[in-house]
Amino acid sequence: MCIFCSIVNNEIPSYKLYEDDDVLAFLDISQTTFGHTVVIPKKHVANILECDDETYAKLMKIVKELSGKIYQKTNAKGINILHNANEVAGQTVMHMHYHIIPRYDETDKLNITFAENHDKDIEKAYELLK
Ligand code: AMP
Ligand code: ZN
């Protein structure tokens, strides 16, 4: 069974921060930064590409509420919200989750950069996606 479903079912322990009928939040075991949290729907869906609107809305409401709470309680200077969808994007647990990652300074353990793509074709992207 999926590891996050096992956490939902209390088959493996977790540091739960929030729980209601549809949503669960618990500390990410990696603690990439202090207070790093994952928020999941209790229902097993793989990621945003498969998630129904109702589940998504419930999940995002809690992501927002917890982001504010964690930001305040940790005295973080900022916060990253991250969702990885599919392996190529770094998803390792195939049960939908949003990461809430408090940020403290440039020495903390998360590094996200948007490097410029020198082969970019922004006109082609626009024609495809508009
Ligand atoms: P992702 O790479 O976006 O799929 O993230 C999966 C996250 O789940 C990683 O940050 C892991 O540290 C975290 N994780 C895996 N197993 C557990 C667990 N048993 N309890 C808490 N977090 C976990
Ligand atoms: Zn699951």
Image (spheres, rainbow, N blue to C red):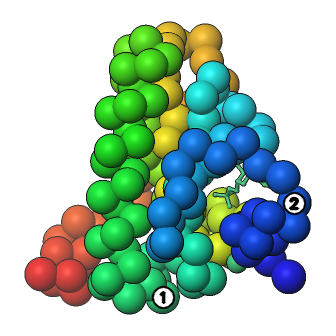
Image position, residue 20 (x, y; %): 48, 63
Residue type of the residue flagged with mark 2? Ile
Of 125 and 58, which appears nearest the observer?
58
Image position, residue 85 (x, y; %): 55, 71
Of 14 and 84, which appears nearest the observer?
14
Task: Identify the residue under disc 2.
Answer: 12
The reply, left or right, for residue 129 in relation to residue 17 is left
Q: Residues within 10 Å of mark 1 (few under 14, many from 20)?
A: few
Which mark identifies residue 50?
1
**Tag 2 and tag 1, C-beta contact below 8 Å:** no
Of 86 and 69, which appears nearest the observer?
69
Which tag, 2 or 1, sits closer to the chain's start? Answer: 2
Question: Is the distance from the Cβ of mark 2 to the nearest ligand 1 atom less than 8 Å?
Answer: yes
Asked if residue 5 is positioned above or below residue 97 in the image, the reply reads below
Q: How many marks?
A: 2
Asked if residue 85 is positioned above or below residue 99 in the image, the reply reads below
